[in-house]
Amino acid sequence: IKKGAKKAAKAAKPIHWAGVLGAGIMGGGIAYQAASRGTPMAMKDIKPEALDLGMSEASKILLKGVEIGKITNQQMAKTLASITPTLEYSTLKDCDIVVEAVVENPKVKDSVLCEMESVLGDKAILASNTSTISIDLLAKNLKRPENFCGMHFFNPVHKMPLVEVIRGKKTSEETIATVVAWASAMGKSPIVVNDCPGFLVNRVLFPYFHGFSLLLRDGADFTAVDKVMEKFGWPMGPAYLLDVVGLDTAVHAANVMAEGFPDRMKKEFKDAIEALYEQKRFGQKNGKGFYAYS
Ligand code: NAD
């Protein structure tokens, strides 16, 4: 990874000003991470309350940093001031790179990406933080697919080192090099992967969730499964992890995986968590999922 990052740094274009579309769990995290590593960020959402939440999450992480003496109050204020919340695409028009992190729905992403591309400069890079949707599918209606790739962060962004950089059929080497270098500058460990539904990590993770859903169907108690997986050595069990991811995002992503791999990803996973999803138990983001949060 280090060798690849050095090579990428040479071919990469500089990033002076960047944007993120969506101020949710991931968009807020990406804005915080990039801003804290020196890239001023614009963060766009369609809801003012989502922008407020994104900014307050960033403040919470920074405050923790101040409390443990990792950063000063001035550094905290500087980072927060370098994130510009906005409801307008036009605020992002001069960005060198924009990462899309809206809901995991191909149609919504398609329209958001096309709208963003239409106001960006010709040289700007667009990236998607999609968990599962094929990059070639998302590139289909873009005018400059060479400037587009996947940039898949993991949750919580400020803690998880891995970033999957996904190469679509038409993605240029310069785009890949720039995104790899920017991810490295953010303190992350990027890996370049080819395009397919779920890329690398979610092709491993979703069959695991699928196995978990089959256990639930067979009558297992989810709290017991979580405890066993923790004893096995994993930082958290599958039910808690699904609450962290967001059950709405997980259902959308499971649909993409089931369509992409119909022979391997049958619909039981969806059945097992759909009841929670339909009751709007989305997980930690709204205080209730498998577990309740206060
Ligand atoms: P989220 O529900 O927390 O946030 C989505 C945000 O997008 C919301 O604030 C919503 O208001 C906003 N939004 C919706 N339509 C928009 C539009 N047209 N323009 C701008 N903003 C819009 O979801 P999330 O968990 O942050 O997921 C976002 C993306 O990141 C998805 O593609 C998801 O698959 C991916 N992802 C999620 C995780 C995870 O663990 N949650 C991990 C990696 C990648």
Image (tube, grey):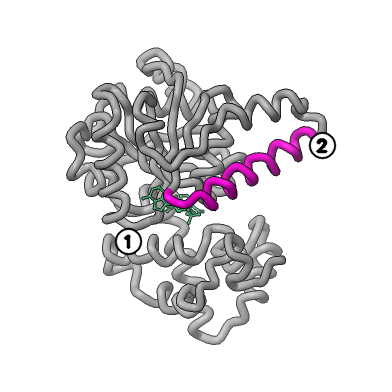
| Residue tagged 1 | 256
Q: Which mark is residue 67?
A: 2
Q: Give the range drawn in magenta.
A: 46-67
Pick whichever, 40 or 183, lies toward us: 40
Task: Please give left or right for residue 258 compared with residue 163 in the image.
Answer: left
Pick whichever, 231 or 205, lies toward us: 205
Pick whichever, 277 or 192, lies toward us: 277
Task: Please give left or right for residue 146 compared with residue 178 in the image.
Answer: left
Residue 113 x, y percent position in the rendering: 29, 42
Q: Is residue 240 magenta?
A: no
Residue 261 x, y percent position in the rendering: 29, 63
The residue at 35%/33% (across/down) is 90
Label 1 to label 2: alpha-carbon separation: 41 Å
Q: What residue type is labelled 2?
A: Glu
User: Is residue 214 visible in this depiction of the protein?
Assistant: no
User: Is residue 73 visible in this depiction of the protein?
Assistant: yes
The residue at 75%/35% (across/down) is 65
Callout 1 secondary element: helix
Quarter of the image where the C terminus is located: bottom right
Q: Is residue 12 above or below residue 61?
A: above
